[in-house]
Amino acid sequence: MNNIRHRIFLLLGPVLAFAVYFFLREKQLTHAMAGTAAMTLWMAIWWITEVVDLGITSLLPIVLLPFLGIMDTASVSQQYMEQTIFLFMGGFFLAFAMEKWKLHQRLAYAIIQRAGATPIRVLLGIMTTTFLISMWISNTATTLMMLTAVMAIINHDQLFEDHSRESMATGYLLALTYTASIGGLATIVGTPTNMILVGFTDKLYPEENPVTFTSWFSFGFPFAFLLAIAAFFIIRHRYFKQGGNTPFDRSFIRNQQESLGIMTYEEKIVLFIFLFTVLAWFTRTSIDFGNFSMPGWSSWFNNGKMIKDSTIAILSSLFLFLWPSRSQTSSTLLSWKDVSKLPFRIILLFGSGFAIAEAFQVSGLAEKMATALTLISGMPSWLLVLVIAALVTLLSEFASNVASIQLMLPILAPLSVSLQINPLLLMIPATISASFGYMMPVATAPNTIVFGTGKVPVKDMVRTGLVLNITAIILLALYTWLREGV
């Protein structure tokens, strides 16, 4: 039965693509427009059903766009090495260095140890730690890093009363997966979807540099912080009604922390490079404080506009690869062997999204859609944000968040043109909504990881995730309305 289902979905992509192509041709769309739309539908079906690996599906534009005569192979291939991809790579290199020298564990145990001696205070400590780490490291890596500490808490015999153990264990694990996704909303490098938006806007508006590390942080961090608070109260109410304030012994956390010993030379240098990178990201462009503006350091260079956040990420990566280590097991802070697990399929996903976006522009499909979408120009912008957030959230529950936003951004850009509003007012909420997959075990990698522990029932993830999804969508619409006056 599974083989039959696999073959059906495998054929469904190209068959529907052909059908849509001929339908659009009858509607007087050009060959290039119809071909681009058909290819996007084909990729969407394979992405959503995952009948073919996401990375393999992402290679379709390199074949289809040249064969259809829409873009030549060289032009398509360039999209797969767009500068934002190097920002993604640099962020992962920093994460690998922190993981290699156990800097993340030191941070995690220190915060949990200081959180307090009750289940609710430890919940707050877990969420705070996860939030801070996931701002800089992918949600998947953050979940894997924190899972050991969280499972140690759950499995400790003396921490919980028997009647509350199961409920609190579920609460801790859901707090981990949800906060890992929420924390990534705060910075550009926190999740791949944020970097996709940066690359997309950089391609559409190369002279304006509309989304920088600082501008994203000023919007994303306050929202992520508010959503994390909401998640804390939702989880506390559902899973810590009984025994949440009963003190317990934290000695095992202290023992784990002490086992790390004093901070090593390598940890100190990795921490220094990490802080240097963050500071350089924040101060690259001018920061507006209202009464005055602080010029960014990139203005010191005549060609300062050529320097991007990805430039800084790779510079820091070079430091990691070149800085000598005092450890007997490693000659430098980071080696190529340490980064061999770089998720190459995500790089292909990035590239395919940029290729789709370029095809929309080159074929004229984006302009055509802008004209067609004038029908909804009377809808209030705040309502439009709410609808878009709900749509992207629903899509991301069944497809990867990367694939979901890859499909939406080329549509939202012309939509904003037809509505005569700033494109970012639609594209930023959509990008944030792509990380709202809190219901289904397959919606995000963190959900899958914690579900794999066997301690989170599906009904709990679905029910709690639904409440958090609805909360996040409404909060995002209100936040955008208050911040931007839409």
Image (cartoon, rainbow, N blue to C red):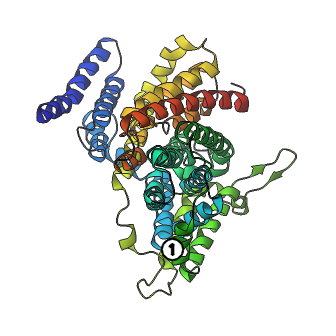
Q: Which residue lies furthest to the right in this view?
A: 291
Considering the image in quadrants, where does the N terminus appear?
top left
**Residue at 36% across / 33% down in the picture?**
398
Residue 169, x across and y down, in percent: 46, 48
Q: In this view, does 264 lie above or below 1?
A: below
Residue 30 at what x, y percent from top left?
A: 34, 21
Camera-side residue of 414 and 465: 465
483 to the left or right of 154: right
Q: Nearer the viewer, residue 126 or 432?
A: 126
Q: Quadrant of residue 269?
A: bottom right
- Check disc 1 and report the residue beneath it: 320
The reply to whether residue 414 is in sight is no
Q: Is residue 41 visible?
A: yes
- The image quadrant where one finds the C terminus is top right
Write the residue at 24% across / 36% down.
67
Identify the secondary structure beneath mark 1. helix
Q: In this view, does 325 lie above or below 406?
A: below
Residue 231 against residue 24 in the figure, above or below? below
